[in-house]
Amino acid sequence: MRTFVAILGLLSAASVNAQVKLPKYAHEVLANGVTVDLLPRGEFPLVNIEVLVKGGNEAEPLEQAGISDLTVQMLREGTAKRSADDFSDQLDALGGSWRAASTAQAARISAQFLSKDFDQGFDLVADALLHPSFPDGQLTKLRSRMVDQVRSEKDQAQQAISRYSNAFYFGSGHPYGRIADEATLGSLDRAKVADFYAHNYTGANIIVIVAGRFDENAAKAAIARTFGAIPAGQPFQWAADPATPTASGNRLLLIDKPDATQTYFTISMPGINRTNPDRSALWLVNTLFGGRFTSLLNDALRVNSGLTYGASSNYQQDKLTGALRISTYTKTDTTVQAIDMVLDVTKKLRETGVTPEQLASARATVEGTYPTRSLETPGELAGQLGDIELFGLNRGEVDDLFSSLDAVTVEKADAVIRKYLQPDGLTFTVLGNASRIREQVKKYAPAMVEVAVSQPGFMIR
Amino acid sequence: MAALPGSGIAPAQELPITSTTLDNGMKVLVEEDHNIPSVALYFFFKVGSRNERPGATGLSHFFEHMMFNGAAKYGPKQFDQQMDRAGGSNNAYTSEDMTVYTDWFPSNSLELMMDMESDRIQHLAFDPKIIKSERGVVYSERRTSVDNSNRGLMQEQMQAAAYEAHPYHWPVVGWPSDIEAWTMDDLKQHFAMGYAPNNCVMVAVGDVKTDEVLRLAKKYMGPIPRHDPPPPVRTIEPKQTGERRAIVHKPAQLPLEMIAYHIPAAHDSSFPTIEVLRALLAQGQSSRLYRRLVDRDQLSIDANAFAQSNLDPGLFVISLQPRSGVETAQVEKAAFEEVEKLRSAPVSDAELQRAKNQLLADSFRQLQTIAGRANLIGRYEVLYGDYHKLSTRGEDIEAVTIADVQKAAAEYLNTDNRTVVTLVPEKKTGVSE
């Protein structure tokens, strides 16, 4: 494969700069606070039903990391009228797909059915969301399986380093730094899950999105009959964004994986939240810096030097200020060479800024590929609507995107580079064969912390 | 566009595809879809690791990388930079059977894409300095996807053990020593062998006019001279006559288990039945392996099965991640019992229909995007020699009977035809020396 980046769905504007629009959709808030978005579209006989429950990982009590994920995954493991087996038999008989996961801001069910099966598919979704019975036996099984999944992630370096990076960068006092592990999952039981469900899965916190080919009136009626009939409850209170930590020297976490033949590392620094006014400019800057194949990072570390298969940067877009993160890997012997090169590329970009040609190219890439990555399938459209509802945005987020990108000047881009691509106060996370790199990586942060990959969990306690 | 028939859920009744063969033998398949103003342009070269030889394994995949490193008109980095400026993006993949280049772009960039593709197909550059650098990239890819990936390593061991004679024995990415040893001559010979226009299928799906695609194809692809395609792969894997095992010792938190059975090539008439078998065993939480191993007995974190659809006979692979404290022997015993049940007793009507419905719904999902359709149309053309097979997929799946399932299970999922690979964790704990 050329790159691991899977680009599955694509659609593009006729001209690179022709603004694409979010298709028309119906938005309604029911009396009990349930938000409903209906977006009928497409010749394809598929319908996506998505339910978001506000809160997600941010709603988890301090010592209960993983409870939002456990709760949302438990929804199909038994309901008032279906056993777990009945549920699976019926879902699979429809050829339906079902994804359940908790993200930073929301627990999320994404289901897809053939359009002709809308009624049965919707009944499964509503039953799972509104009448879960959380059978003790199924809960015990799922919880212990999730513990083993945490262990299994340790065997997959790229997944593991992402977890370690979040845990170390944010710390266990921050919702994004609390990573589920043996200890937090082990403390969860049926009573806690039922309690979490009762507090969070209420009308005021639920968003129902239907996109694809379906009958709008039938969907509206079905939602009113089910989701419309639950108690409003209390709206989830979002936590205030903690002040961005000020730079006070570098930090480094070294994770020892003695059998690793290459070193994986990330460098994290403060980024933005989802509604930050710099988001359009940072999108363009990150595209140039580490967001595409021809980016400065990939060009230096892969194309020009052959040090790695891929070097990239990305930034979180969540409710709270997230991290901007550089990620790559290289063979053990070239660890320092690669880290130095990343720092050098970053420094040079700070010093030189971008040219008008670079900025135009980044804009063409973002505008040309944005609709194809975000608006082609019902699932992608539902994702857009989910973002709009969760973060209090509006359809301008899509409809005015290109004009906001076009408005980014070279001066603005350079200012954003200087603001976010910091030369110090960096958080390094390095995973590899510690005996061979320990002494060398000390230079980045003399007071580094070291753990063994076999040590339970990802959080540094 | 696929249509939903009045009853039933058969996908892709008839995709409106135009098929043309240029004078030099390049096949051009076009499906117009004006719902979105964008194009997926895919090139399928019928050359992969099965066309390689010992000592030069991984060349097809290396070529996939080199194709982005400069040609006559568009020099190093130009392909990607031009693509960026046009608002497009690209990727590529290599398998045992083919090397595939994938471009997605706004429809007004069609001519630029044709020009750039033609340039690299015809006039690829061979710069020793770039080759040296790209060798490092490919080695890093191998380190990531095999050497530092337990599943990747297991899969490599599985192929190597299951195939003794056929080229599916060696990995697509290549053996490490071969990656280090390729010579310039090896590279040039491989390029001359694989990149003939008569060895290529081009697929354009999206906001295009068929006439315009053909005009540009004639202009840019037409002048590429026809030459001999890769010689036929003569070796047929001898019938396996007893279980084979491979064991991987590696530090790991949890063991891994892969069980592989030889199955026929994709074009074989039994392949739809094999896909049904796969769904029965491992698709969804109602599947037999999930219900037994993951849910009831709690032996495994997950239960996956995959049927390789290849030009030559491939493998049916069951992949399991045992729970902590569970021995691989326990996991495989339970898995073998579930496989045996498919051989010894017929499945119910309801269970068979469930598996079929899952497969048919999946087909729809794959056809949702222009990229998904371009990929499927090209793969079907290469694997079956005829993209029309895509249109009959629904009927082919629906036609599978209870007896077919039991017969195929008996024929293929048997002990003598089995290769078992286990990863046994070596516990290295604590901070190293």
Image (cartoon, coloured by chain):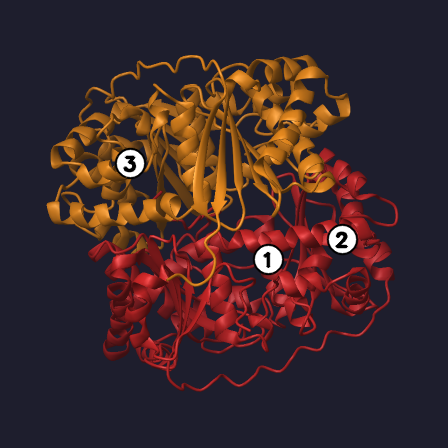
Chain colours: A red, B orange
Judged by depth in the image, the label closer to the viewer, 3 or 1, is 3
Closer to viewer: mark 2 or mark 1: 2
Q: Amino acid at mark 3?
A: Trp
Quadrant for residue B145, please give it. Answer: top left
Residue B172 position within the rendered picture, expressed as x and y whole percent measured from the top left: 34, 34
The reply to the same-chain question for discs 2 and 1 is yes
Secondary structure, mark 2, is helix
Q: Which residue is mark 1?
A: A383
Asked whether, in this view, residue B14 is left or right of residue B291, the answer is left
Question: Pointer 2: what residue?
Answer: A139
Q: How many numbered markers are drawn?
A: 3
Using the image, determine if residue B189 lies above or below residue A383: above
Left/right placement of residue A178 relative to residue A26 reads: left
Quarter location, residue A102? bottom right
Disc 2 to disc 1, C-alpha distance: 29 Å
User: Which residue in the protein does label 3 denote?
Assistant: B175
User: Where does residue B105 sit, x and y in percent of width and height?
Assistant: 37, 48
**Residue type at the position of mark 1:** Gly
Neighbor class of circle 2 (other Cα within 10 Å; few <14, some 14-19, many 20+) is many
- Tell me the distance, in whole angstroms, between the alpha carbons under discs 3 and 1: 42 Å
